[in-house]
Amino acid sequence: MIAFSDRVRTALTSREPVVALESTVISHGLPFPENFKTAIECERLIEAEGAVPATVGIVAGVPRIGITNEELRTFAEKPIGIAKIGLANMAALIARRRWGATTVASTIRIASLGGLTYNDTPRPLVFATGGIGGVHRGAKDSFDISADLTALAATQIVCVCAGAKAILDLEKTRECLETLGIPVIGFQTEEFPAFYSRKSGLEVDASVDTPDQAAELALISWRMGSRGAVLICAPVAEEYEISPAEIDGIIEEAHAEARSIGVSGRELTPFLLSRISEATGGRSLAANRALLANNAKIAARIAVSLNRLVCR
Ligand code: PSU
Ligand code: MN
């Protein structure tokens, strides 16, 4: 059911460190051509650290772990319809042989099916993204809570992110992570980062300073019976940061607009991200690109450390 690129297959047989990447952020999180450049840059950064990038997506009905640059371009430019694939609509899309961009939830599901997670091999996988999905603002009325949370709770993977998407209710998202027993670890920070901003005022469970420490903590978590992910949270670099005071108003306005024209569910995140980019004159886009690259690099370093600890 799952197909691997040659490069990823070789990496798996020769036990090289692998870093998985999602494709929804490419197809629906960033505009073209910045999305293509960012995706290529993330893959290059991972290679430069001595790991193998594995971008996940559904290509003409086939779930793929590792895609070609040409396929990556299709995900970025979207000359054909490319659906955002969560866990609930994955089977239907595969049945119709369509292309689909995978979210955090569906990317780690496919990685797990490919035998890429600690649950399965044990061959621990590291996954890099921008911000995870979580509890949406207004969730008490809309009930919109991302399947990313429950997927992370069920997949033994290291997930490197800049916290949760800033458009969410971060306090409720943080509480859900606690309920699900997902360790929230600050990477060189004592606070849960807020995506565009370095700080949220919310706590992390612990903080680590090095990739080795992150890898060790993940292994202990799994050896102590966790069936889920370890979330490594790295704040965006200072020069790209947008202050909470500035971004919060913009996010609220984008939400109000979404409500007034009836955008909800799966469409909500892409809509909000593009409105926020317009309202910040592209600064949110620059921040998003910078944090994606930063997370890819940190993920690769953790993958190398983890590989050393497990495969010796
Ligand atoms: N973070 C971003 N851009 C994105 C996403 C996260 O900076 O596009 C995507 C991820 O793929 C994440 C998804 O898994 O949004 C969550 O969507 P939802 O809230 O609909 O579950
Ligand atoms: Mn949702």
Image (spheres, rainbow, N blue to C red):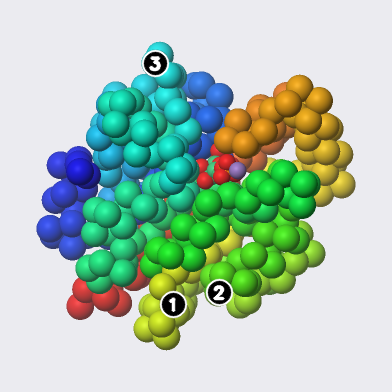
Tag 1 or tag 3, which sits nearer the N-term? Answer: 3
Residue type at mark 3 is Ile
Quarter of the picture holding the C terminus: bottom left
| Cα–Cα span, label 2 and label 3 | 39 Å
Residue 24: x and y, percent? 48, 36
Residue 6 visible in the shown view: yes
- Residue indicated by mark 1: 226
Q: Is mark 1 within 8 Å of ligand 1?
A: no
- Residue indicated by mark 3: 80
Residue 242: x and y, percent? 76, 44
Horizontal side of 147 relative to 172 (left or right) equals left
Considering the numbered disc 2 on the image, is that residue within a helix, a strand or a loop?
loop
Considering the numbered disc 3 on the image, is that residue within a helix, a strand or a loop?
loop
Horizontal side of 21 relative to 244 (left or right) equals left
In-front residue for pair 179/220: 179
Residue 268: x and y, percent? 65, 34
Residue 73 visible in the shown view: no
Q: Residue placed at 18% from the left, 62% from the top?
A: 15
